[in-house]
Each structure stands twice: as structure tokens, then as C-alpha cells.
Image (cartoon, helix red, strand yellow):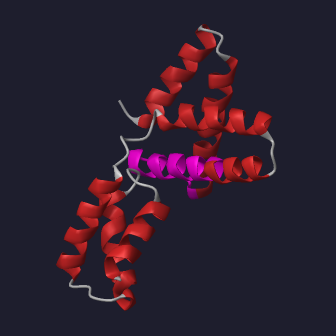
Amino acid sequence: MSLNERLNEDMKQAMKSQDKFRLSVIRMIRSAIKNVEIDQRKTLDDSEVLDILSREIKQRRDSLLEFEKAGRDDLAVTVKQEIDVIAVYLPQQLTEEEVKEIVQQTISEVGASSKADMGKVMSALMPKVKGRADGKLVNQVVQQSLN
């Protein structure tokens, strides 16, 4: 079952169970997907939908950080719940140790030796961890490894 089909089924389930919060989050996700489909004039495949889900989670994590800085716990709780709903549709996230292992493999494959090679490493690495690791974490691990 594709991610789009799964989102549709989960939306129907949320309607039946009258879970208004989950329903609204799924509708927001589907709206973001539909907007991209309209812009690109094509139906998105699972990897493209995964990109959108990752972007949506990243936006919410950024918002969460800002809400916590501002002391808006009411909004922070809501955003955390949205992140939890969206995270269900993403593949299982890699641990920091797994990311470090993949980074080391990629560095040896590319033959990187200094921070000047960071672009080569990141371009080879990101397709391997796409949707399974936070870009910020990957960037930090690469920087530490190249020092």
C-alpha cells in the first residue's frame, strides 16, 4: 500500500472514530501533498511523499523550538502531538550510532580527508539516509568525523 493510500485509509479511520485532532493533521499532510502534485502536474510516488512528510516534521520541530523558547507550552504540546502523528508515516529513524557507521563508510568510499570534502560526503550520504535521519544530526556527525 502506498503512502497516499495509507493516508486516505487512516483519514477514513479517523473520521469513523471521530478523532478530530488526528483527522486535522492527516488533512494538513494530504493538503501539502496535493499542493505539490498540482504544482508539478503529476502524481507523487512514495519517495516524494516521504520528502514532504520529512519537510512537515522539520517545520514542526522548528516551531516547537521557538514555542519552547517563548514559553508557549500550550502550543508546544499541540506541535509535539502533530509530530507524533506524522512520524507514524516515516520509516524508522536511524540511531546516532547507525548514522556514525554510515558516515564512516561514506567517508572511506569518497576518500574524504578534510572539511573541504564535506560537500562530496554529504551528496553521497544523503540518499542513503533519506527520510531515516535528521539532516542536522547527519551534518554534525560528518563535521565531527572530518575533524
Question: Residue placed at 55% from the left, 31% from the top?
Answer: 85
In the image, taking residue 29 as reference, residue 74 lies left or right, namely right
Which segment is the magenta one?
40-60
Residue occupying the point 36% across, 40% down: 92
Residue 56: say if magenta.
Answer: yes
Q: Where residue 135 sits in the image (x, y, percent)?
A: 46, 62
Q: Nearer the viewer, residue 4 or 22?
A: 22
Name the residue at the top extreme.
Answer: 17
Q: Residue 93: image x %, image y %?
A: 38, 45
- Residue drawn at the location 24% of the way across and 77% of the way down: 107
**Magenta-drawn stretch, dominant element (helix, strand or loop):** helix
User: With 80 as the anchor, is 119 left or right in this view?
Assistant: left
Q: How many marks?
A: 0
- Assign the C terminus to one quadrant of the image: bottom left
Q: Is residue 4 above or below residue 53?
A: above
* In this picture, residue 13 sits left or right of residue 60: left
Give residue 121's quadrant in the image. Answer: bottom left
Q: Nearer the viewer, residue 38 or 89?
A: 89
Question: Which of the 4 quarters of the picture holds residue 26?
Answer: top right
State the residue at coordinates (56%, 57%): 40
Residue 112 percent location from the top left of the image: 26, 85
Q: Relative to residue 114, is residue 138 depicted above or below?
A: above
| Foreground residue among 136 and 120 | 136
* In this rendering, position of residue 88 left or right of residue 61: left
Q: Is residue 91 magenta?
A: no
Q: Quadrant of the N terminus?
A: top left
Res 141 → quadrant: bottom left
Percent x, y of residue 79: 68, 38
